Image (spheres, rainbow, N blue to C red):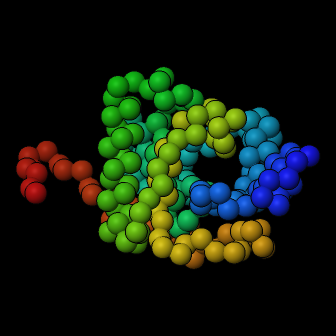
């Protein structure tokens, strides 16, 4: 093992958390969720089951033609939504053109609705492709829409292995669903 700037640089473990020019949010509490993937794989896909339930029970915010928006059952923040195709498909490249377009449109609409409901300062958007990339449900593609506020990260997850979510999932779903624009009926014209 060698020393560099007074820090032992053997296997790198002693460098975890050391300042290096990057700001990282260490979330070791998420490993239990990631590592439980093998037990979840044997059960029914929650994204395939959800559309067969009523919106309140499934936490569905909006249903589209090819995709739907649902609250994350294990949110990073209040209002953390997932955009999922109805079809059970694991990889972004396996989406049809219509599915890909609608996932994109619903992602943008989810951001607009979240801004109306909770005025976040920013968003994290992303898809984890495969279990090795951190996908909790690797078999069914889903786009994360995570609202962020200045100061929304605190010491709870690191010290107490607890994430403080200030709003119940049902309450968040109700507010987001109520703010989602309603589809136009036949004969209506769009106004901007």
Q: Is residue 117 visible?
A: no
Q: Is residue 23 visible?
A: yes
What residue is rendered at 82% in x and 61% in y? 6
Q: Is residue 109 left or right of residue 76?
A: left
What residue is rendered at 88% in x and 48% in y? 2
Displayed quadrant of residue 5: bottom right
Displayed quadrant of residue 23: bottom right
Q: Nearer the viewer, residue 174 or 17?
A: 17
Above or below residue 57? Residue 36 is above
What residue is rendered at 71% in x and 68% in y? 157
Q: Nearer the viewer, residue 64 or 82?
A: 82
Name the spot of residue 29 as percent of width and height, x first: 76, 60
Above or below residue 164? Residue 74 is above
Name the spot of residue 62 as percent of width and height, x first: 40, 52
Name the spot of residue 146 as percent of width and height, x first: 49, 58
Q: Is residue 26 left or right of residue 59?
A: right
What residue is rendered at 74% in x and 46% in y? 34
Q: Is residue 38 left or right of residue 119?
A: right
State which quarter of the image contains the C terminus.
Answer: bottom left
Q: Nearer the viewer, residue 140 or 159?
A: 159
Q: Is residue 36 left or right of residue 109?
A: right
Which residue ends up furthest to the right in the rendered image? 1
Name the spot of residue 86 as percent of width and height, x first: 47, 35
Tally the marks.
0
Above or below residue 154? Residue 125 is above
């Amino acid at each position: 093992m060698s020393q560099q700037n007074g820090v032992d640089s053997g296997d790198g473990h002693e460098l975890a958390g050391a300042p290096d020019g990057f700001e990282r949010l260490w979330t070791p509490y998420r490993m239990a969720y990631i590592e439980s993937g093998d037990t979840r794989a044997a059960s029914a896909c929650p994204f395939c089951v959800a559309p067969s339930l009523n919106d309140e029970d499934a936490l569905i915010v909006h249903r589209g033609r090819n995709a739907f928006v649902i609250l994350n059952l294990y949110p990073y923040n209040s209002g953390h939504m997932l955009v999922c195709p109805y079809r059970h498909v694991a990889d972004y490249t396996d989406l049809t053109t219509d599915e890909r377009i609608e996932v994109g449109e619903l992602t943008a609409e989810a951001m607009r609705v979240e801004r109306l409901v909770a005025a976040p300062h920013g968003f994290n958007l992303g898809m984890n492709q495969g279990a090795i990339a951190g996908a909790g449900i690797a078999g069914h593609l889903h786009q994360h829409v995570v609202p962020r506020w200045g100061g929304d990260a605190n010491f709870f997850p690191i010290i107490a292995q607890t994430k403080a979510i200030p709003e119940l999932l049902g309450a968040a779903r109700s507010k987001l669903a109520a703010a989602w624009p309603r589809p136009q009926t036949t004969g209506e014209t769009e106004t901007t």
